[in-house]
Amino acid sequence: MPQARTSREEFAALCLRLRARGINNAELLNAVEQTSRHLFVPAEHMAYAWSAQTIPIECGAFIEGADLAIELIAQMKLKATHRVLEIGTGSGFTAAVIGRLVERVLTIDRYKTLVTQAQERMDKLALRNVIVRQADGSVGLIGEGTFDRIFITTAFNALPRVYAEQLVSGGMLVAPVVGEDGKATMVKLVKAGSRFEREDLFEVPYQPIVPNVAQIL
């Protein structure tokens, strides 16, 4: 079918772009290929599913361009035994890819609409190890123990201490932090005892976090 051929060609082009940036992990790329992005993208934007373009979705949110989403997942250096907390479910695409690589993913969003849609997509993909919840991401996910990785897609001026308490020793937090210039930079923090080793990565389009659960959308 023409659409299937187009999808394969788009994915191949994505792989070439990623490899040019040093991302060639076969396990990660296989997980991406198994997670049809067309399931997560609105019909009117289907032509851009595998592109680097940011795509709007419901509730004023957006799905990252494929290149950025996969590069961020690659930065986390995931292992099969990891438990991952994602704050900012959005379409659910990154949670779905991560779910193919790790033991368990808990992903939360403040919008019920996004949570419901993401859960439906996980069901279609039979990803039983990905749990989707509506919750206030500004406080992490209290009561679920600690995580090997915390991945945040909403920006903070400064990361709350509560996230450090929800990471295992040696765990990693990947999150956007807003600088004095008002721009968000993705930051990688590795927990070493009571402190963090920080590495600034690159500028990202994420917006400041909105606390509390949405009551309408």
Image (cartoon, rainbow, N blue to C red):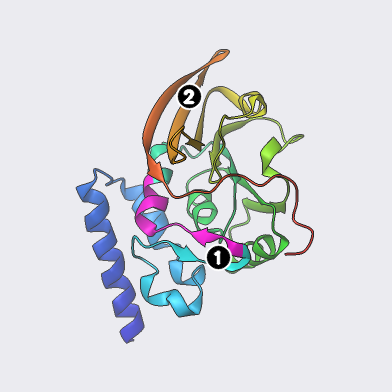
**Whole-percent x and y of residue 97?**
48, 54
Q: Distance of mark 1 from mark 2, alpha carbons?
A: 31 Å
Task: Please rate how many residues cluster around mark 1, counting C-alpha atoms within 10 Å: few if below 14, some from 14 to 19, many from 20.
Answer: some
Which span is picked out in magenta? 60-71
What's the amino acid at mark 1? Leu
Q: Is residue 132 left or right of residue 66?
A: right
**Whole-percent x and y of residue 205?**
44, 50
**Whole-percent x and y of residue 137?**
67, 43
Whether residue 73 appears in magenta in the rendering, the answer is no
Picture residue at 49% right of the left edge, 79% below the top: 43
- Disc 1, SS: loop
Residue with the mark numbered 2: 190
Q: From the viewer's side, name the closer residue of 26 and 151.
A: 151
Q: From the viewer's side, name the closer residue of 42 and 127.
A: 42
Q: Quadrant of the C terminus?
A: bottom right
- Which numbered dot is residue 166? none
Picture residue at 46% right of the left edge, 37% below the top: 79
Query: Residue 22's quadrant in the figure?
Result: top left
| Between discs 1 and 2, the one toward the N terminus | 1
* Image position of 94 with respect to 217: above or below: above
Q: Quadrant of the N terminus?
A: bottom left
Q: Is residue 212 left or right of residue 93?
A: right
Residue with the mark numbered 1: 125
What's the amino acid at mark 2? Val
Picture residue at 71% right of the left edge, 52% below the top: 133
